[in-house]
Amino acid sequence: MRQDDLPVRGGKVTAYVYDTGRPEVHEAAARAYAEMLEVNCLDPTAFPSIVEMERQVVGAVAAELGGGHGIFTSGGTESIMLAVKAARDSRPVAGRPALVAPVTAHPAFHKAAHYLGLDVVRTPVDPGTFRADPAAVAAAITRDTVLVVASAPSYPQGVLDPVAEIAAAAAARGVPCHVDACVGGWLLPWLREAGAEVPPFDLSVSGVTSLSCDLHKFGYAPKGASVVLFRDPAMRRRAYYASAAWPGYTVINATVQSSRSAGPLGGAWATLQALGREGYLRLGRDTLAAARLLREGVAGIPGLRVLGDPVSSLVAIAGSDEVDVFVLSDEARKRGWFLQPQLSYAGIPANIHITVTGATLAGVDAMLKVIAESAAAARERGPATPPPGLVELVAGLDLDALDDAAFGELAASVGVNLTGGGQPEMAVVNAILDALDPETRESILIRFLSTIYA
Protein backbone atom coordinates (compact mmCIF):
# COMPACT_ATOMS: atom_id res chain seq x y z
CA MET A 1 0.00 0.00 0.00
CA ARG A 2 2.91 2.35 0.65
CA GLN A 3 4.45 2.10 -2.81
CA ASP A 4 3.33 5.62 -3.77
CA ASP A 5 3.97 7.23 -0.35
CA LEU A 6 6.53 9.97 0.02
CA PRO A 7 9.67 8.76 1.83
CA VAL A 8 9.84 9.65 5.53
CA ARG A 9 13.65 9.56 5.72
CA GLY A 10 16.44 11.08 3.66
CA GLY A 11 15.45 14.76 3.51
CA LYS A 12 13.77 14.71 0.08
CA VAL A 13 10.36 15.51 1.58
CA THR A 14 10.51 19.10 2.83
CA ALA A 15 7.25 19.08 4.82
CA TYR A 16 5.25 16.76 7.09
CA VAL A 17 8.23 14.69 8.31
CA TYR A 18 11.31 15.57 10.37
CA ASP A 19 14.47 13.52 10.07
CA THR A 20 17.52 13.60 12.33
CA GLY A 21 19.55 11.52 9.90
CA ARG A 22 20.31 9.24 12.87
CA PRO A 23 18.44 5.91 12.56
CA GLU A 24 19.33 4.82 16.10
CA VAL A 25 17.33 7.75 17.53
CA HIS A 26 14.22 6.81 15.56
CA GLU A 27 14.67 3.15 16.53
CA ALA A 28 14.87 4.05 20.24
CA ALA A 29 11.68 6.09 19.90
CA ALA A 30 9.93 3.24 18.08
CA ARG A 31 10.82 0.78 20.87
CA ALA A 32 9.49 3.11 23.56
CA TYR A 33 6.40 3.84 21.47
CA ALA A 34 5.68 0.12 21.20
CA GLU A 35 6.31 -0.39 24.93
CA MET A 36 3.66 2.23 25.79
CA LEU A 37 1.33 1.44 22.87
CA GLU A 38 -1.46 -0.16 24.89
CA VAL A 39 -1.17 2.06 27.95
CA ASN A 40 -4.26 4.30 28.10
CA CYS A 41 -3.82 7.93 29.09
CA LEU A 42 -7.49 8.10 30.08
CA ASP A 43 -6.78 7.36 33.75
CA PRO A 44 -3.41 8.43 35.22
CA THR A 45 -4.22 6.65 38.48
CA ALA A 46 -4.36 3.34 36.60
CA PHE A 47 -1.06 3.94 34.79
CA PRO A 48 1.28 6.06 36.96
CA SER A 49 4.03 5.73 34.34
CA ILE A 50 2.28 8.30 32.15
CA VAL A 51 2.34 10.85 34.97
CA GLU A 52 6.08 10.51 35.52
CA MET A 53 6.83 10.43 31.81
CA GLU A 54 4.68 13.51 31.12
CA ARG A 55 6.24 15.41 34.01
CA GLN A 56 9.67 14.80 32.53
CA VAL A 57 8.70 15.71 28.97
CA VAL A 58 6.75 18.83 29.94
CA GLY A 59 9.47 19.78 32.40
CA ALA A 60 12.13 19.59 29.69
CA VAL A 61 10.10 21.88 27.43
CA ALA A 62 9.32 24.33 30.24
CA ALA A 63 13.01 24.49 31.19
CA GLU A 64 13.90 25.75 27.69
CA LEU A 65 10.88 27.99 27.12
CA GLY A 66 10.54 30.18 30.18
CA GLY A 67 8.87 27.86 32.67
CA GLY A 68 5.17 27.31 33.05
CA HIS A 69 2.78 24.42 33.62
CA GLY A 70 2.00 22.14 30.73
CA ILE A 71 -0.06 19.42 29.10
CA PHE A 72 1.20 16.79 26.66
CA THR A 73 -1.08 16.69 23.60
CA SER A 74 -1.40 14.93 20.24
CA GLY A 75 -0.11 17.84 18.17
CA GLY A 76 -0.09 21.57 17.60
CA THR A 77 -3.76 21.79 16.71
CA GLU A 78 -4.79 20.18 19.99
CA SER A 79 -2.35 22.34 21.94
CA ILE A 80 -3.83 25.44 20.32
CA MET A 81 -7.37 24.16 20.90
CA LEU A 82 -6.65 23.87 24.63
CA ALA A 83 -5.02 27.30 24.76
CA VAL A 84 -8.07 28.87 23.11
CA LYS A 85 -10.44 27.00 25.46
CA ALA A 86 -8.48 28.09 28.51
CA ALA A 87 -8.46 31.72 27.39
CA ARG A 88 -12.18 31.67 26.59
CA ASP A 89 -13.09 30.13 29.93
CA SER A 90 -10.78 32.37 31.95
CA ARG A 91 -12.15 35.59 30.45
CA PRO A 92 -15.97 35.55 30.10
CA VAL A 93 -17.29 38.36 27.92
CA ALA A 94 -20.75 39.77 27.39
CA GLY A 95 -20.70 39.34 23.62
CA ARG A 96 -19.36 36.59 21.40
CA PRO A 97 -15.71 35.95 22.34
CA ALA A 98 -13.06 36.77 19.76
CA LEU A 99 -9.39 36.11 19.19
CA VAL A 100 -7.03 38.43 17.33
CA ALA A 101 -4.56 36.75 14.98
CA PRO A 102 -2.30 37.93 12.14
CA VAL A 103 -3.19 36.61 8.67
CA THR A 104 -0.08 34.40 8.87
CA ALA A 105 -1.28 32.63 12.04
CA HIS A 106 -1.87 28.91 11.65
CA PRO A 107 -5.38 27.77 10.61
CA ALA A 108 -5.51 25.76 13.85
CA PHE A 109 -6.67 28.99 15.53
CA HIS A 110 -9.53 29.26 13.06
CA LYS A 111 -10.37 25.61 13.63
CA ALA A 112 -10.37 26.11 17.41
CA ALA A 113 -12.57 29.19 17.04
CA HIS A 114 -14.95 27.24 14.79
CA TYR A 115 -15.27 24.41 17.30
CA LEU A 116 -15.39 26.60 20.41
CA GLY A 117 -17.67 29.40 19.23
CA LEU A 118 -15.29 32.34 18.80
CA ASP A 119 -14.82 34.92 16.08
CA VAL A 120 -11.39 35.46 14.51
CA VAL A 121 -10.23 39.00 13.81
CA ARG A 122 -7.42 38.90 11.22
CA THR A 123 -4.74 41.57 11.26
CA PRO A 124 -2.31 42.46 8.46
CA VAL A 125 1.41 41.74 8.35
CA ASP A 126 4.19 43.90 6.98
CA PRO A 127 4.23 43.34 3.18
CA GLY A 128 8.04 43.20 3.09
CA THR A 129 8.97 41.28 6.24
CA PHE A 130 5.69 39.33 6.66
CA ARG A 131 5.88 39.95 10.42
CA ALA A 132 2.73 40.83 12.34
CA ASP A 133 1.99 44.52 12.83
CA PRO A 134 1.76 45.24 16.60
CA ALA A 135 -0.18 48.46 16.04
CA ALA A 136 -2.79 46.62 13.96
CA VAL A 137 -3.03 43.93 16.63
CA ALA A 138 -3.50 46.52 19.37
CA ALA A 139 -6.17 48.32 17.35
CA ALA A 140 -8.10 45.07 16.85
CA ILE A 141 -8.45 44.31 20.57
CA THR A 142 -11.94 45.00 21.92
CA ARG A 143 -13.84 44.18 25.08
CA ASP A 144 -14.84 40.86 23.50
CA THR A 145 -11.25 39.77 22.80
CA VAL A 146 -10.24 36.77 24.90
CA LEU A 147 -6.91 35.92 23.23
CA VAL A 148 -4.20 37.55 21.12
CA VAL A 149 -1.88 35.43 18.96
CA ALA A 150 1.74 35.75 17.88
CA SER A 151 3.87 33.21 15.97
CA ALA A 152 7.43 32.09 16.66
CA PRO A 153 7.86 31.63 13.80
CA SER A 154 4.86 31.81 11.48
CA TYR A 155 4.81 28.75 9.23
CA PRO A 156 4.32 30.36 5.79
CA GLN A 157 7.54 32.42 5.67
CA GLY A 158 9.39 31.29 8.80
CA VAL A 159 9.62 34.80 10.29
CA LEU A 160 9.33 35.65 13.96
CA ASP A 161 6.52 38.01 14.95
CA PRO A 162 7.40 40.87 17.35
CA VAL A 163 6.29 38.84 20.35
CA ALA A 164 7.26 41.31 23.06
CA GLU A 165 5.33 44.18 21.44
CA ILE A 166 2.25 42.07 20.77
CA ALA A 167 2.26 40.61 24.28
CA ALA A 168 2.62 44.10 25.77
CA ALA A 169 -0.36 45.33 23.74
CA ALA A 170 -2.44 42.41 24.98
CA ALA A 171 -1.34 42.82 28.59
CA ALA A 172 -2.21 46.52 28.52
CA ARG A 173 -5.82 45.49 27.83
CA GLY A 174 -5.78 42.59 30.28
CA VAL A 175 -5.99 40.00 27.48
CA PRO A 176 -4.05 36.71 27.39
CA CYS A 177 -1.43 36.26 24.67
CA HIS A 178 -0.59 32.89 23.13
CA VAL A 179 2.66 32.29 21.26
CA ASP A 180 2.38 29.63 18.59
CA ALA A 181 5.85 28.09 18.78
CA CYS A 182 4.63 24.75 17.45
CA VAL A 183 7.35 24.80 14.79
CA GLY A 184 10.00 26.89 16.51
CA GLY A 185 9.65 26.08 20.19
CA TRP A 186 12.08 23.18 20.15
CA LEU A 187 14.31 24.71 17.47
CA LEU A 188 14.87 28.40 18.24
CA PRO A 189 16.68 27.78 21.56
CA TRP A 190 19.20 25.54 19.80
CA LEU A 191 19.60 27.97 16.90
CA ARG A 192 20.31 30.72 19.44
CA GLU A 193 22.99 28.55 21.08
CA ALA A 194 24.38 27.85 17.61
CA GLY A 195 24.86 31.58 17.00
CA ALA A 196 21.60 32.79 15.44
CA GLU A 197 20.06 36.07 16.61
CA VAL A 198 16.78 34.98 18.15
CA PRO A 199 14.88 37.61 20.18
CA PRO A 200 12.94 36.50 23.29
CA PHE A 201 9.67 34.82 22.36
CA ASP A 202 8.65 32.42 25.13
CA LEU A 203 7.06 32.57 28.61
CA SER A 204 9.99 34.66 29.80
CA VAL A 205 8.45 37.55 27.84
CA SER A 206 6.14 39.71 29.94
CA GLY A 207 2.53 39.35 28.80
CA VAL A 208 2.89 35.91 27.19
CA THR A 209 0.43 33.68 29.02
CA SER A 210 0.61 30.43 27.01
CA LEU A 211 2.76 28.77 24.37
CA SER A 212 2.56 25.67 22.17
CA CYS A 213 5.58 23.59 21.14
CA ASP A 214 5.50 20.47 18.95
CA LEU A 215 8.00 17.76 19.78
CA HIS A 216 7.11 15.82 16.64
CA LYS A 217 8.62 18.64 14.58
CA PHE A 218 12.10 19.78 15.60
CA GLY A 219 11.99 17.57 18.69
CA TYR A 220 12.14 14.74 16.09
CA ALA A 221 9.72 12.60 18.13
CA PRO A 222 7.18 10.27 16.46
CA LYS A 223 3.95 11.95 15.37
CA GLY A 224 1.43 12.74 18.06
CA ALA A 225 3.67 14.77 20.40
CA SER A 226 3.16 18.39 21.46
CA VAL A 227 3.17 20.44 24.66
CA VAL A 228 1.09 23.46 25.61
CA LEU A 229 2.49 25.56 28.44
CA PHE A 230 0.58 28.02 30.64
CA ARG A 231 2.23 30.67 32.78
CA ASP A 232 -0.44 30.24 35.47
CA PRO A 233 -1.57 26.82 36.76
CA ALA A 234 -5.08 28.25 37.15
CA MET A 235 -5.22 28.81 33.38
CA ARG A 236 -3.99 25.28 32.76
CA ARG A 237 -6.93 24.06 34.84
CA ARG A 238 -9.22 26.00 32.50
CA ALA A 239 -7.97 23.75 29.68
CA TYR A 240 -9.13 20.63 31.53
CA TYR A 241 -12.58 19.07 31.21
CA ALA A 242 -14.45 17.09 33.87
CA SER A 243 -17.90 15.53 33.93
CA ALA A 244 -19.60 13.87 36.88
CA ALA A 245 -23.19 14.15 35.63
CA TRP A 246 -23.64 10.50 34.74
CA PRO A 247 -23.61 7.15 36.58
CA GLY A 248 -20.46 5.82 34.90
CA TYR A 249 -16.73 6.13 35.54
CA THR A 250 -15.26 9.49 36.53
CA VAL A 251 -14.41 11.61 33.48
CA ILE A 252 -11.50 14.03 33.80
CA ASN A 253 -9.56 14.92 30.66
CA ALA A 254 -6.48 17.07 30.26
CA THR A 255 -6.84 16.96 26.47
CA VAL A 256 -9.58 16.95 23.85
CA GLN A 257 -9.27 13.19 23.61
CA SER A 258 -10.31 10.77 26.32
CA SER A 259 -8.85 7.33 25.59
CA ARG A 260 -5.52 7.72 23.84
CA SER A 261 -2.41 5.63 23.53
CA ALA A 262 0.63 6.54 25.59
CA GLY A 263 2.76 5.46 22.61
CA PRO A 264 3.45 9.03 21.41
CA LEU A 265 4.37 10.07 24.96
CA GLY A 266 6.80 7.16 25.21
CA GLY A 267 8.26 8.00 21.81
CA ALA A 268 8.74 11.65 22.74
CA TRP A 269 10.32 10.77 26.10
CA ALA A 270 12.74 8.34 24.46
CA THR A 271 13.71 10.82 21.73
CA LEU A 272 14.56 13.48 24.30
CA GLN A 273 16.69 10.95 26.20
CA ALA A 274 18.40 9.65 23.04
CA LEU A 275 19.38 13.07 21.69
CA GLY A 276 19.93 15.14 24.82
CA ARG A 277 21.07 18.76 24.79
CA GLU A 278 24.23 18.03 22.84
CA GLY A 279 22.32 16.13 20.17
CA TYR A 280 19.79 18.92 19.72
CA LEU A 281 22.54 21.54 19.65
CA ARG A 282 24.37 19.63 16.92
CA LEU A 283 21.17 19.32 14.92
CA GLY A 284 20.58 23.05 15.46
CA ARG A 285 24.01 23.89 14.06
CA ASP A 286 23.46 21.65 11.03
CA THR A 287 19.99 23.11 10.46
CA LEU A 288 21.27 26.69 10.68
CA ALA A 289 24.06 25.95 8.20
CA ALA A 290 21.73 24.17 5.77
CA ALA A 291 19.16 26.99 5.86
CA ARG A 292 21.87 29.56 5.14
CA LEU A 293 23.21 27.56 2.20
CA LEU A 294 19.68 27.09 0.85
CA ARG A 295 18.87 30.81 1.00
CA GLU A 296 22.17 31.72 -0.63
CA GLY A 297 21.73 29.09 -3.34
CA VAL A 298 18.18 30.17 -4.18
CA ALA A 299 19.35 33.78 -4.54
CA GLY A 300 21.52 32.61 -7.45
CA ILE A 301 18.69 30.90 -9.37
CA PRO A 302 17.06 33.21 -11.95
CA GLY A 303 13.37 33.84 -11.41
CA LEU A 304 13.32 32.81 -7.72
CA ARG A 305 13.56 34.76 -4.46
CA VAL A 306 13.25 34.01 -0.75
CA LEU A 307 10.34 35.77 0.95
CA GLY A 308 11.21 37.82 4.04
CA ASP A 309 14.17 37.18 6.32
CA PRO A 310 13.43 33.87 8.04
CA VAL A 311 15.01 33.55 11.48
CA SER A 312 14.31 29.83 11.63
CA SER A 313 14.75 27.04 9.11
CA LEU A 314 11.48 27.52 7.24
CA VAL A 315 12.13 28.99 3.79
CA ALA A 316 9.45 30.24 1.37
CA ILE A 317 10.51 30.71 -2.26
CA ALA A 318 8.47 32.85 -4.63
CA GLY A 319 8.60 32.59 -8.40
CA SER A 320 8.13 35.20 -11.10
CA ASP A 321 6.47 35.73 -14.47
CA GLU A 322 9.05 33.38 -15.93
CA VAL A 323 8.96 30.64 -13.25
CA ASP A 324 5.63 29.29 -12.01
CA VAL A 325 6.20 27.80 -8.55
CA PHE A 326 3.34 25.33 -8.99
CA VAL A 327 5.00 23.93 -12.11
CA LEU A 328 8.35 23.97 -10.32
CA SER A 329 6.84 21.87 -7.52
CA ASP A 330 5.54 19.28 -10.01
CA GLU A 331 8.92 19.16 -11.75
CA ALA A 332 10.69 18.58 -8.43
CA ARG A 333 8.24 15.78 -7.67
CA LYS A 334 9.23 14.06 -10.90
CA ARG A 335 12.82 14.21 -9.68
CA GLY A 336 11.94 12.56 -6.37
CA TRP A 337 11.66 15.67 -4.19
CA PHE A 338 8.57 17.13 -2.51
CA LEU A 339 8.55 20.94 -2.25
CA GLN A 340 5.32 22.12 -0.61
CA PRO A 341 3.24 24.59 -2.67
CA GLN A 342 1.52 27.47 -0.87
CA LEU A 343 -1.28 29.55 -2.40
CA SER A 344 -1.30 33.35 -2.47
CA TYR A 345 -3.21 35.12 0.30
CA ALA A 346 -3.58 38.66 1.70
CA GLY A 347 -1.10 40.09 -0.78
CA ILE A 348 1.50 37.37 -0.14
CA PRO A 349 2.42 35.67 -3.44
CA ALA A 350 2.19 31.96 -4.16
CA ASN A 351 5.38 30.15 -3.20
CA ILE A 352 7.00 26.85 -2.38
CA HIS A 353 7.79 26.07 1.24
CA ILE A 354 10.83 24.15 2.45
CA THR A 355 11.33 22.95 6.01
CA VAL A 356 15.05 22.49 6.64
CA THR A 357 15.76 19.74 9.21
CA GLY A 358 18.81 18.13 10.77
CA ALA A 359 19.15 15.79 7.81
CA THR A 360 19.11 18.56 5.17
CA LEU A 361 22.74 19.66 5.41
CA ALA A 362 24.04 16.44 3.86
CA GLY A 363 21.72 16.88 0.87
CA VAL A 364 21.45 20.65 0.46
CA ASP A 365 23.59 20.68 -2.70
CA ALA A 366 21.38 18.00 -4.25
CA MET A 367 18.28 19.98 -3.25
CA LEU A 368 19.59 23.16 -4.86
CA LYS A 369 20.45 21.25 -8.01
CA VAL A 370 16.88 19.91 -8.19
CA ILE A 371 15.41 23.37 -7.55
CA ALA A 372 17.55 24.87 -10.32
CA GLU A 373 16.67 22.08 -12.77
CA SER A 374 12.98 22.30 -11.87
CA ALA A 375 12.99 26.09 -12.25
CA ALA A 376 14.57 25.72 -15.71
CA ALA A 377 11.94 23.13 -16.67
CA ALA A 378 9.17 25.36 -15.36
CA ARG A 379 10.54 28.27 -17.38
CA GLU A 380 10.48 26.11 -20.49
CA ARG A 381 6.96 24.75 -19.83
CA GLY A 382 5.47 28.12 -18.97
CA PRO A 383 2.88 28.81 -16.27
CA ALA A 384 0.09 26.41 -15.38
CA THR A 385 -2.98 27.63 -17.24
CA PRO A 386 -6.45 26.30 -16.42
CA PRO A 387 -8.70 25.53 -19.40
CA PRO A 388 -10.58 28.66 -20.56
CA GLY A 389 -13.63 29.36 -18.43
CA LEU A 390 -12.88 26.64 -15.87
CA VAL A 391 -12.09 29.00 -12.99
CA GLU A 392 -15.35 30.86 -13.58
CA LEU A 393 -17.20 27.54 -13.84
CA VAL A 394 -15.76 26.29 -10.55
CA ALA A 395 -16.44 29.60 -8.81
CA GLY A 396 -20.09 29.40 -9.85
CA LEU A 397 -20.65 25.73 -9.01
CA ASP A 398 -23.31 24.65 -6.56
CA LEU A 399 -21.09 22.08 -4.88
CA ASP A 400 -23.94 20.74 -2.78
CA ALA A 401 -25.66 19.67 -5.99
CA LEU A 402 -22.66 17.53 -7.02
CA ASP A 403 -22.12 14.06 -5.62
CA ASP A 404 -18.59 12.76 -5.09
CA ALA A 405 -18.57 10.89 -8.39
CA ALA A 406 -19.44 14.03 -10.35
CA PHE A 407 -16.78 16.01 -8.49
CA GLY A 408 -14.27 13.28 -9.32
CA GLU A 409 -15.14 13.64 -13.00
CA LEU A 410 -14.60 17.39 -12.78
CA ALA A 411 -11.16 16.80 -11.26
CA ALA A 412 -10.35 14.29 -13.99
CA SER A 413 -11.07 16.98 -16.58
CA VAL A 414 -7.94 18.83 -15.41
CA GLY A 415 -5.85 15.66 -15.20
CA VAL A 416 -6.27 14.67 -11.54
CA ASN A 417 -7.47 11.16 -10.76
CA LEU A 418 -8.89 11.28 -7.23
CA THR A 419 -9.83 7.60 -7.11
CA GLY A 420 -6.49 6.06 -8.10
CA GLY A 421 -3.01 5.90 -6.60
CA GLY A 422 0.20 7.50 -7.73
CA GLN A 423 1.28 11.10 -7.54
CA PRO A 424 -0.75 13.33 -9.88
CA GLU A 425 0.55 16.62 -11.22
CA MET A 426 -1.07 19.41 -9.23
CA ALA A 427 0.07 22.61 -10.99
CA VAL A 428 -3.22 23.27 -12.81
CA VAL A 429 -5.25 22.38 -9.71
CA ASN A 430 -3.17 24.76 -7.61
CA ALA A 431 -3.51 27.45 -10.28
CA ILE A 432 -7.30 27.08 -10.15
CA LEU A 433 -7.35 27.21 -6.35
CA ASP A 434 -5.03 30.22 -6.39
CA ALA A 435 -7.48 32.11 -8.63
CA LEU A 436 -10.42 31.49 -6.26
CA ASP A 437 -11.39 33.33 -3.10
CA PRO A 438 -10.50 31.58 0.19
CA GLU A 439 -14.09 30.55 0.99
CA THR A 440 -14.47 28.80 -2.39
CA ARG A 441 -11.06 27.20 -1.97
CA GLU A 442 -12.20 25.73 1.33
CA SER A 443 -15.37 24.30 -0.21
CA ILE A 444 -13.37 22.73 -3.03
CA LEU A 445 -10.86 21.22 -0.61
CA ILE A 446 -13.61 19.66 1.49
CA ARG A 447 -15.09 18.06 -1.62
CA PHE A 448 -11.61 16.89 -2.65
CA LEU A 449 -11.21 15.12 0.70
CA SER A 450 -14.68 13.60 0.52
CA THR A 451 -14.05 12.27 -2.97
CA ILE A 452 -10.71 10.60 -2.32
CA TYR A 453 -12.24 8.73 0.62
CA ALA A 454 -15.45 7.85 -1.25
Image (spheres, grey):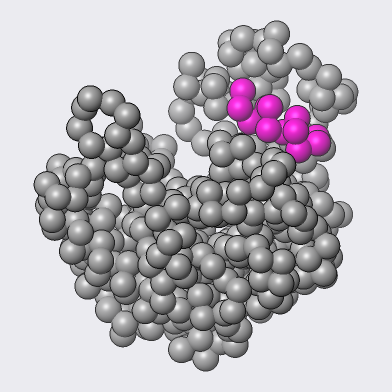
Q: Nearer the viewer, residue 192 or 167?
A: 167
Vertical side of 345 occupied by 202: above or below: below
Visible residue check, residue 7:
no
Residue 240 screen position, x and y as percent: 39, 49
Left or right of 215 on screen, residue 333: right
Name the magenta segment's main secondary structure. Answer: helix
Q: Position of residue 122 (x, y in %)?
A: 76, 52
Q: Is residue 438 magenta?
A: yes
Q: Position of residue 378 (x, y in %)?
A: 73, 51
Q: Is residue 60 left or right of residue 380?
A: left
Up the image or down, 14 lies above or below 406; here it is below
Tell me if I can see residue 54 in this picture: yes
Question: Which of 265 and 352 lies nearest the eye of the viewer?
Answer: 265
Q: Quadrant of residue 402?
A: top right
Q: Residue at x 83, y 62 (%)?
A: 139
Split into 4 quadrants, where in the image is the N terminus?
top left
Give percent across and percent down for residue 446: 61, 27
Image quarter for residue 427?
A: top right
Instruction: Kindly identify the residue that appears in the image at 80 percent across and 35 percent down.
Output: 436
Camera-side residue: 446 or 231?
231
Q: Is residue 411 above or below residue 35?
A: above
Image mark count: 0
Magenta span covers which residues? 436-447
**Residue at the (30%, 34%) spot, across then down:** 244
Q: Is residue 370 magenta?
A: no
